[in-house]
Image (cartoon, rainbow, N blue to C red):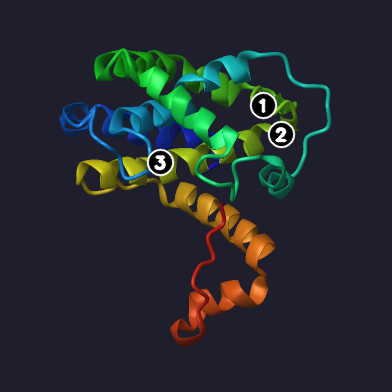
Amino acid sequence: MSVRDDYLATAAVAAAFLAEPVVAGRWAEPSALAKLSTGGLAAHLSRQIVLVPGILGAEPSADPPIDLVEHYNRVKWRGADLDEETNAGIRDTGELAAAPGPEAIAAEVAGALSVLPDLVLGRPDGGVRVPWTGWTLTVDGFLTTRLLELIVHTDDLAVSVGAATPEFPSSAVQTVVDLLSRLAVQRHGAVSVLRALSRAERAPATIAAI
């Protein structure tokens, strides 16, 4: 499957999980992520769906797209302290978006899902300007960043509510694992990643990519 197909399939899985009653039931409780409620986490997850129509519906960017590793090198939140301004802002945005409640979030997600197939599959290959960074990615690059967010945060949400993490398309998981592996090598070095994946007795304490 293409990255575009994988994004649509993964968004549908995440949307179905967001609509689970257990998520609404624990909306105000702390999530598995520090300083973020379950509702705030769910709202942040929903933004990986509800913001995409507006971004893909904009005119293609004339700026040259940057590589995904460079994208993650530039973002301020990667590897930053929990209370770093960008991380605090992400949490605040999630909590604000969660305030209307789970039904409102579900309605927003459903509305986005209804228009996403035409936008995602019909979008020309020109660059996508990421509004919260200001730089440009390819269409597939941008959707890959959303895949990572969808899969990682759906798992976070499942842990938060004590549910099993839903199954995602294997090709989408492979795309995200490939990206995380590249980022882990870039951050920790090839030897550390090789040992973590092959030699438990010599594995480093972490090879966390983000």
Amino acid, disc 1: Val
Mark toward the start of the polypeptide (2 vs 3): 2
Using the image, tell me which numbered label, if any, was put on residue 130.
1
Residue 183 placement: quadrant: bottom right
Residue denoted by label 3: 153
Residue 106 image point, x, y percent: 30, 19
Residue 134 placement: quadrant: top right
Using the image, tell me which numbered label, if any, was put on residue 155.
none
Density class for disc 2 (Cα within 10 Å; few <14, some 14-19, many ≥20) is many
- The Cα atoms of the two marked residues, 1 and 3, are separated by 19 Å
For the residues bearing labels 1 and 2, Cβ distance under 8 angstroms: yes
Q: Nearer the viewer, mark 1 or mark 2?
A: 1
Q: Report the side of 126 relative to 5 (left or right).
A: right
Residue 60 image point, x, y percent: 74, 19
Residue at 44 percent of width and 82 percent of height = 200
79 vs 24: above or below: below
Residue 146 image point, x, y percent: 53, 36
Q: Which of 143 and 204 is in front in this view?
A: 204
For the residues bearing labels 2 and 3, Cβ distance under 8 angstroms: no
Amino acid, disc 3: His
Q: Report the side of 201 relative to 14 (left or right).
A: right
- Outermost residue toward the bottom in this view: 201
Residue 68 image point, x, y percent: 69, 45
Q: Which of 115 and 22 is in front in this view?
A: 22
Mark toward the start of the polypeptide (1 vs 2): 1
Q: Nearer the viewer, residue 73 or 18?
A: 73
Residue denoted by label 2: 137
